Structures are given as structure tokens and as C-alpha cells.
Image (spheres, rainbow, N blue to C red):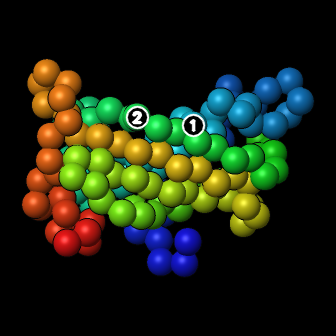
Amino acid sequence: MENAVYTADIDVRLRDVDFMGHVNNAVYATYIEQAREAFFEEALDVSLVEVGTVLVNLEIDYRRPIEATDEVEITLDVTDLGTSSIPMEYEVRADGELAATARTVQVLVDEDGDAKPLPAEWRNRIGGE
């Protein structure tokens, strides 16, 4: 991921840490979600709370534990826009070291929950067309 679309700094909270002193594996998904929400707000000027999107895929490959004192940074890259989907790839870094990689697919849906095309403005802002 050399030409990342977005980077977000994430604060490790005490509640994120498990009994072994590491950030719990499930919390990585929350960190990725935080980065995705920040990306939508900054790049598209919308909140995930305000638009109808659903997460249809999430994959995380863990590389190393994140410690409570680590500085965490998430790098997000939109890989290839679909008609209604936004596939994203992530790098999770802890103190500059790769801690995990992840992939998600977010789909824009209408009020009935059916997929709908991404707005042209989103495509322009993301750089997909």
C-alpha cells in the first residue's frame, strides 16, 4: 500500500487490552471501522451513520500483537470501486511495525436494503472514475 488514500491515528484504550496485555483481536475490527468512518467523513463528506451502507465482508490477518502503549495507525486504500461496493485494504501499524492487514467491502444500499449505485460524486472524490 504505497499510495494510500487515507491514514488515521487510533488511540488504544484500557478496555481494548486483554488479560495478556495485548489489544484483543476483536478490537482490530473496531479500529478498522474507526478508520473507515473517518475516511467517509473526510474524503466523501458523509458519515456512515447518515448513509445507508452495510459491511458485507471483513478479513483480518494478524501479524503481531498491539500493546497498550503502542501508537496505532491505520492506512486505508480503496482498491477498486464496484457498481455499489467500495472494497478497501488496510494496514494496521503499531509503533510503525505491521500488526495486521485487513480487507473490507462496504456496499451502498437503499431504504429497502437493496444495493444501489455509488453516487458519481463519491467516485470522483475517491478517484475511481
In this view, the residue farthest toward the bottom is 2
Foreground of the two, 53 or 96: 53
**Direction from residue 19 to residue 127 in the image, left or right:** left
Q: Viewer-nearest of labels 1 and 2? A: 2
Q: Secondary structure at mark 2?
A: strand
What amino acid is labelled 2 in the image? Val
In the rendered image, the vertical position of residue 43 relative to residue 104, given as above or below: below
Is the C terminus in the top left, top right, bottom left or bottom right quadrant? Answer: bottom left
What is the quadrant of residue 92 in the picture?
bottom right
Q: Which percent across, then down, holds residue 86?
A: 33, 52
**Mark 1 surroundings: few (<14), some (14-19) or many (≥20) residues within 10 A:** some
- How far apart in space, not on screen, are marks 1 and 2 (Cα)? 13 Å
Q: Earlier in the sequence, mark 1 or mark 2?
A: 1
Residue at 12% in and 24% down: 111
Residue at 60% in and 59% down: 91
In this view, the residue farthest toward the right is 20
Q: Which percent across, then down, holds residue 37?
A: 37, 44
Q: Secondary structure at mark 1?
A: helix
Q: Which percent across, then down, holds residue 113?
A: 20, 24
**Direction from residue 108 to residue 112 in the image, left or right:** left
Q: Which residue is mark 2?
A: 56
Residue 41 marker: none
In the rendered image, the vertical position of residue 103 relative to residue 25, given as above or below: below
Asked if residue 128 shows in the view, the reply is yes
In the rendered image, the vertical position of residue 93 relative to residue 55, given as above or below: below
Is the N terminus in the top left, top right, bottom left or bottom right quadrant? Answer: bottom right
What is the quadrant of residue 48 in the picture?
top left
Foreground of the two, 52 or 35: 52
Q: Which percent across, then down, holds residue 114?
A: 18, 29
**Direction from residue 42 to residue 71 in the image, left or right:** right
Asked whether the beta carbons under mark 1 and mark 2 sit within 8 Å of each other, the answer is no
Q: Which residue is mark 1?
A: 29
